[in-house]
Image (cartoon, rainbow, N blue to C red):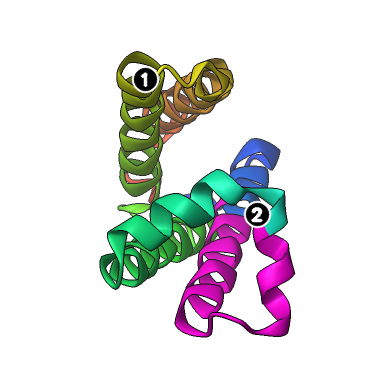
Amino acid sequence: MTAQRTPAGIKLLSVFFGFGAAMCSLTTVMLLFPGSALDSLWKLNPDAHAAFQSLGKLSILLMLIIGAACALASIGLTKPARWGIPLALGILIVNLIGDSLNALLRHDWRTLIGLPMGGAMIAYLLSVRRRVLNQDPENKYE
């Protein structure tokens, strides 16, 4: 098997998921320590703060799960691991479903901005996976 270079788009998506993991970690800390100096960050998205408060302690578990999934996707895309692209695709698909439901059920039309971006990322991951598999069926990006 010949060594393949990691495509630039995969590197960027790895950074994207790493950033997502970092933001989940920050959110988890803010939820665990209300009233801290970090609380002023909730001004950036007061709706999220209210939603997390309504979930109570479940919001911490949710952020831990999402953060771990993002961190694993980042690692899986960087390695490359066999499960990297499928995990990244799964996260993006769940996010698209969530954005669609928010738009339809809550009439939060701002969430629709995520649809073309998420769709583009999904299309890119599928094309990279297909291209790599056609070149080298033993490649880790399957």
Residue at horizontal 56 percent and vertical 75 percent from the top: 30
Q: Is residue 77 left or right of residue 130?
A: right
> Which percent across, then down, holds residue 39?
66, 72
Can residue 5 be seen here?
no
Q: Does residue 21 sit above or below 129 in this rendering?
A: below
Residue at horizontal 50 percent and vertical 26 percent from the top: 118
* Residue 74, disc: none
Q: In terms of depth relative to the viewer, which is nearer, 73 or 82? A: 73
* Secondary structure mostly seen in the magenta stretch: helix
Q: In terms of depth relative to the viewer, which is nearer, 115 or 16? A: 115
Q: Is residue 20 magenta?
A: yes
Question: Which amino acid lies under the numbered mark 1 shown in the image of this protein?
Answer: Ser
Query: Magenta region: which residues?
Result: 17-42
Q: Which residue is mark 1?
A: 100
Using the rendered view, name the quadrant where residue 13 is placed. top right
Q: Which residue is mark 2?
A: 15
Q: In terms of depth relative to the viewer, which is nearer, 38 or 132? A: 38
> Which percent across, then down, holds residue 58?
26, 67
Q: Secondary structure at mark 2?
A: helix
Q: Mark 1 packing: few (<14 Cα in 10 Å), some, or many (20+)?
A: some
Residue at horizontal 30 percent and vertical 67 percent from the top: 56
Cα–Cα span, label 1 and label 2: 25 Å
Can residue 132 be seen here?
yes
> Which percent across, then down, holds residue 21?
52, 63
Image quadrant containing the C terminus: top left
Q: Is residue 18 magenta?
A: yes
Q: Secondary structure at mark 1?
A: helix
Q: Does residue 17 sit above or below 111 in this rendering?
A: below
Question: Which amino acid lies under the numbered mark 2 shown in the image of this protein?
Answer: Val
Q: Mark 2 packing: few (<14 Cα in 10 Å), some, or many (20+)?
A: some
Sequence-wise, the earlier of marks 1 and 2 is: 2
Nearer the observer, disc 1 or disc 2? 1
